[in-house]
Image (cartoon, rainbow, N blue to C red):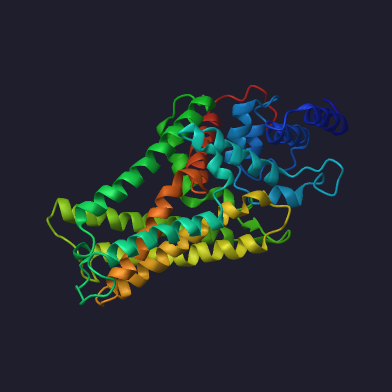
């Protein structure tokens, strides 16, 4: 086997001759060649045992492994070849840069891929403010910003069918764009058929956020080499808060169309309870993630993606703040104004789902399923144990 110095020299020569378009993939290929010779981090997460099944790393392999990486930071702080070593091995940063390329490359429609480079905090807030202002002005010329209390009847302000058509169209497009993008990604991975056991394992790993435990169950590295469970906890609050809010909307839809029970719903009804619990999760989770994002070690991840990360966090947080505020003041004359602001933020969130940080969860689920399938297949290289 070639020495680490030889592998690093060859990989650096390849990097020097690569085009700017493939520079990020070339860097991942370089660090993985070094990691494949070292294999100290083999037990940290799924990336490293998946890596040992390969001697070469093509385009699809690199994007698969990059999306399998959860950027926990454990390998960076454990690596003897990390900066300031001359090999400059930084797996989290290299993988993060390729992930951004994944979202852009597989974006649908293809011309929208460039939005990932511009989906920042300023754009997210400007879009939310613009849509909210539009709805406020529409309300001002219609029912009026302030009116007599309507007992929480949102549809007296904006008709039910109008809301369904508008938000259904935006959310439907977002779901379609994400589905078509991840389908193209999945085809390139060529994973083979998924057994029930593989699907169950991948689902388990997604729901538990297994690979945010640093490989030892102690959590991620954030500001230094000390492990902390808070990034995983804040992700759980965000993830399940989002799911609870979605469940609230779904239950309300069933109430409306199947049971003939129309809004407004009582404070102790299932839609309101689910929405309140989800809203609290979407307050604590994003606030915590933003706090960690601002404090994180400078070598972790890709600094160029911080605006995209923070834009998504901000929209989630504002969705919760405005939703909870709307619930609190729904029986007052300011309900119409609060509703317009909340709907503007929600529409901005939906519109940016396919072209912002939300995409990482969708592609990561696909990568985890690929790994669950792959690890059940023979490892013909026998470079490492699963």
Is residue 386 at least partly visible in the picture? Answer: no
Is residue 117 in view? yes
On the rendered structure, is 376 left or right of 14? Answer: left
Q: Residue at x 58, y 59 (%)?
A: 231
Q: Residue at x 70, y 25 (%)?
A: 55
Nearest to the observer: residue 139 or residue 373: 139
Instruction: Name the residue rendered at 41%, 65% in the picture.
Output: 320
Q: Of 276 and 48, which appears nearest the observer?
A: 276
Q: Is residue 6 above or below residue 327?
A: above
Q: Position of residue 316 (x, y in %)?
A: 46, 59
Counting every numbered tag in the picture gives 0
Where does the image place residue 203, in percent across and percent down from the top left? 44, 43
153 sits left or right of 36 in the view = left
Left or right relative to 69: residue 34: right
Instruction: Identify the residue at the far left of this view.
Output: 260
* Residue 280 spot, x, y in % from top left: 41, 67
For residue 276, which quarter of the picture? Answer: bottom left
Front in this rendered view, residue 184 or 127: 127
Name the quarter where the C terminus is drawn: top right
């Amino acid at each position: 086997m070639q020495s680490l110095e030889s592998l690093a020299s060859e990989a650096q020569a390849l990097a020097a001759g690569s085009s700017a378009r493939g520079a990020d993939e070339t860097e991942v290929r370089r660090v993985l060649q070094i990691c494949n010779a070292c294999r100290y981090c083999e037990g940290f997460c799924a990336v490293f045992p998946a890596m040992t099944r390969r001697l070469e790393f093509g385009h699809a392999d690199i994007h698969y492994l990059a999306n399998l990486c959860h950027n926990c930071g454990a390998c960076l702080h454990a690596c003897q070849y990390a900066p300031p070593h001359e090999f400059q091995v930084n797996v989290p940063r290299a993988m993060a840069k390729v992930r951004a390329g994944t979202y852009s490359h597989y974006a649908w429609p293809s011309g929208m891929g460039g939005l990932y480079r511009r989906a920042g905090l300023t754009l997210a807030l400007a879009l939310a403010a613009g849509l909210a202002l539009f709805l406020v002005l529409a309300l001002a010329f219609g029912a009026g910003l302030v009116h007599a209390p309507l007992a929480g009847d949102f549809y007296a302000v904006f008709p039910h069918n109008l809301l369904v058509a508008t938000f259904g169209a935006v959310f439907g497009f977002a779901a379609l764009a994400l589905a078509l993008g991840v389908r193209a990604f999945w085809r390139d991975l060529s994973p083979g058929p998924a057994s029930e056991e593989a699907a169950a394992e991948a689902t388990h790993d997604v729901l538990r956020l297994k690979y945010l435990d640093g490989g030892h169950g102690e959590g991620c590295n954030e500001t230094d080499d000390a492990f902390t469970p808070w990034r995983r906890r804040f992700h759980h609050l965000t993830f399940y808060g989002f799911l609870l809010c979605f469940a609230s909307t779904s239950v309300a839809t069933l109430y409306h169309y199947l049971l003939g029970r129309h809004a407004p719903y009582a404070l102790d009804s299932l839609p309101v309870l689910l929405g309140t619990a989800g809203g609290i999760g979407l307050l604590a989770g994003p606030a915590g993630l933003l706090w960690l994002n601002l404090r994180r070690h400078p070598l972790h991840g890709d600094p160029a993606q911080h605006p995209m990360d923070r834009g998504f966090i901000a929209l989630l947080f504002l969705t919760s703040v405005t939703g909870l505020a709307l619930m609190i003041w729904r029986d007052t004359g300011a309900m119409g104004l609060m509703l317009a602001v909340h709907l503007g933020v929600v529409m901005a969130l939906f519109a940016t789902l396919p072209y912002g940080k939300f995409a990482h969860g969708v592609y990561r689920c696909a990568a985890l399923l690929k790994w669950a399938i792959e690890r059940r297949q023979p490892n013909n290289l026998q470079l490492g144990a699963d």
